[in-house]
Image (cartoon, grey):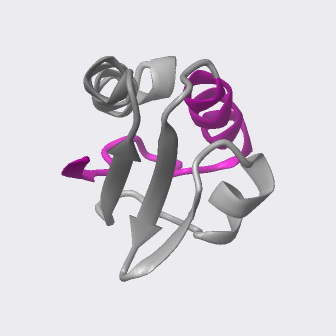
Amino acid sequence: MIETQLTIINKLGLHARAAAKLSSTAASFGSDIQLGVEGKFVDCKSVMSLMLLAAAQGREITFIIEGKDEELANETLCALVNDYFGEGE
């Protein structure tokens, strides 16, 4: 199991487009992937669940990843968050 904390750095936070990218990326892995904000965790493969977290810029998020491909999943998801979800800012 891997647990990683990050900060949402893009201006719009975890809005619809970012949530869709995050969930589709998470869905490409076989591992169980949970995303949490302030102790509330949801399935990272569900767009609607991610949007309900309402993670704005500057919020701390936590990934909990468990499975055979957990290391690659963690690296990929962290890179996506740190790349502003591919949105440039």
Where residue 4 sits: x, y (%)? Answer: 20, 49
- In the depicted view, which residue is nearer to us: 33 or 54? 33
Name the side, left or right, on which 72 lies relative to 34: left
Q: Where is residue 27, by image quadrant?
A: top right
What are the residue bounds of the magenta stretch? 1-27
Where residue 28 sits: x, y (%)? Answer: 61, 18
Q: Where is residue 82, by image quadrant?
A: top left
- In the depicted view, which residue is nearer to us: 31 or 87? 31
Residue 18 part of the magenta-drawn span = yes
Image vertical order of residue 38 relative to residue 85, above or below: below
Identify the residue at image location x=66%, y=42%.
Answer: 45
Identify the residue at image location x=42%, y=19%.
Answer: 88
Residue reaching furthest to the bottom: 39
Name the side, left or right, on which 66 lies relative to 54: left
Where residue 20 sits: x, y (%)? Answer: 71, 34
Image vertical order of residue 54 relative to residue 34, above or below: below
Work out which quarter of the rendered image holds the C terminus and state it. top left
Where residue 51 sits: x, y (%)? Answer: 69, 59
Residue 16 part of the magenta-drawn span = yes
